[in-house]
Image (cartoon, rainbow, N blue to C red):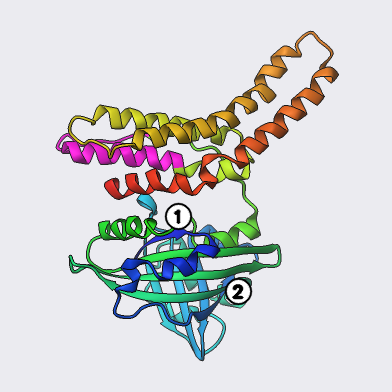
């Protein structure tokens, strides 16, 4: 079982992070990065991807490691999923090594057990990552690894630059990952990342757009404590906020801005509701208001470019409205590109809330 917290960082901040006080006190500070070249394999129709898994062979010097990762949860930004890693003798996967480990009655198990699958596998994309690994042992006794990554995801359809930090729990409680993330945030801006390197690679292949995500129902138990109830509600709000983040940045669906603002309003209401028993840190509400105002400018122009001008054109010459509508749409795009999710300031209240509710 793999448990890790993924964080995005600017490439220019990686060197500064290497000298962060928390990492500098490690018994083994970051040395020369190791090149990790990982080739991901799938069938022509991406059957492995569509059954919620990824399959790679990683090259580390003369060593070859085959890894199958199954779809798990990414609750509160924490990846929690099954991982099967085995050495192999070649640069291509050996599915026979996995057949005894994956339940045969699952979609992935049936795919791995099908003899024709191996013959149809082909490389679909490659990641080339320079990685520095720093082991940490916390005063609590929890043990984790901090990986500093810089490199690319390359496919025939294009390439994506990566600069990231991965915190992997080796022993202890998942909450310690958030504590380390907050401490590292004191040195450089960091943002929770909801996509793995495999996700980025498949995005290049599939070119899927990010749809607007509405809030999911909140389920509370009769015996839940106040803290349990608060965490369930706050996590639900944060899930809605972060699920719309990529859609806000990409701009494929203007409704993502609206749904992200809805999530922010719901979170502020939750903080108000529990303020007397679980007070937020000073200034958090101000930060949430700032995020909402950043998104508000984009949303106002999107509404003007859409429904408002369409209503104004009723009974008039529609051609006269088109240049105005196009100008408003361009302003909306510019505002969206400057919106909060692209800002390092966005990471601070987001990471704080995640640490309280992880």
- Residue 223 on image: x %, y %: 14, 37
- Residue 270 on image: x %, y %: 30, 31
Total tally of numbered discs in the picture? 2
325 left or right, relative to 78: right
260 left or right, relative to 330: left
Q: Which mark is residue 256?
A: none
Could you tell me which residue is drawn at 65 percent across and 53 percent down? 207
Which of disc 1 and disc 2 is earlier in sequence? 2
Asked whether 226 falls inside the magenta stretch, the response is: yes
Residue in front for this viewpoint, 176 or 43? 176
Query: What segment carries the magenta color?
Result: 217-241
Q: Which residue is mark 2?
A: 121
Q: Is residue 222 above or below residue 2?
A: above
Could you tell me which residue is drawn at 39 percent across and 41 percent down? 238
Q: Which residue is mark 1?
A: 189
Could you tell me which residue is drawn at 67 percent across and 37 percent down? 333
Residue 1 visible here: no
Residue in front for this viewpoint, 165 or 153? 165
What secondary structure is marked by label 2?
loop
Could you tell me which residue is drawn at 57 percent across and 32 percent down? 255
* Dominant secondary structure (helix, strand or loop) of the stretch shown in magenta: helix
Asked whether 16 falls inside the magenta stretch, the response is: no
Q: Is residue 277 above or below residue 107?
A: above
């Amino acid at each position: 079982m793999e448990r890790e917290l993924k964080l995005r960082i600017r490439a220019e901040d990686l060197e500064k992070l290497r000298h962060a006080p928390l990492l500098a006190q490690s018994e083994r500070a970051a040395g020369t990065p190791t090149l990790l070249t990982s080739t991901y394999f799938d069938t022509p129709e991406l059957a492995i991807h569509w059954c919620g898994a990824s399959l790679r062979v990683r090259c580390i010097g003369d060593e070859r490691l085959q890894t199958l990762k199954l779809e798990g949860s990414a609750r509160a930004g924490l990846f929690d999923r099954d991982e099967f890693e085995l050495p192999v003798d070649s640069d291509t996967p050996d599915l026979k090594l996995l057949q005894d480990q994956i339940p045969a009655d699952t979609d992935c198990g049936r795919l791995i057990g099908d003899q024709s699958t191996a013959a149809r596998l082909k490389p679909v994309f490659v990641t080339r990552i320079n990685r520095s690994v720093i082991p940490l042992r916390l005063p609590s006794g929890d043990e984790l690894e901090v990986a500093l990554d810089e490199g690319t995801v390359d496919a025939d359809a294009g390439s994506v630059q990566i600069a990231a930090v991965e915190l992997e729990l080796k022993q202890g409680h998942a909450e310690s990952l958030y504590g380390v993330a907050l401490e590292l945030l004191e040195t450089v801006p960091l943002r929770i990342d909801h996509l793995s390197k495999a996700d980025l690679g498949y995005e290049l292949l599939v070119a899927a757009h990010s749809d607007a995500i509405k809030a999911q129902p909140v389920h509370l138990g009769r015996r839940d404590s106040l803290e349990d109830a608060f965490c369930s509600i706050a996590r639900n709000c944060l899930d809605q906020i972060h699920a719309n983040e990529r859609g806000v940045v990409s701009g494929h669906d203007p409704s993502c801005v609206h749904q992200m603002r809805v999530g922010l309003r719901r979170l502020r209401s939750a903080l108000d509701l529990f303020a007397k028993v679980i007070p937020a840190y000073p200034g958090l509400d101000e930060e949430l208001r700032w995020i909402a105002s950043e998104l508000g400018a984009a949303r106002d122009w999107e509404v003007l470019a859409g429904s408002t001008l369409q209503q104004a054109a009723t009974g008039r010459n529609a051609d006269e409205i088109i240049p105005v509508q196009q100008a408003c749409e361009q302003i909306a795009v510019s505002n969206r590109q400057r919106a909060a999710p692209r800002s390092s300031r966005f990471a601070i209240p987001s990471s704080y809330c995640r640490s309280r509710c992880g």
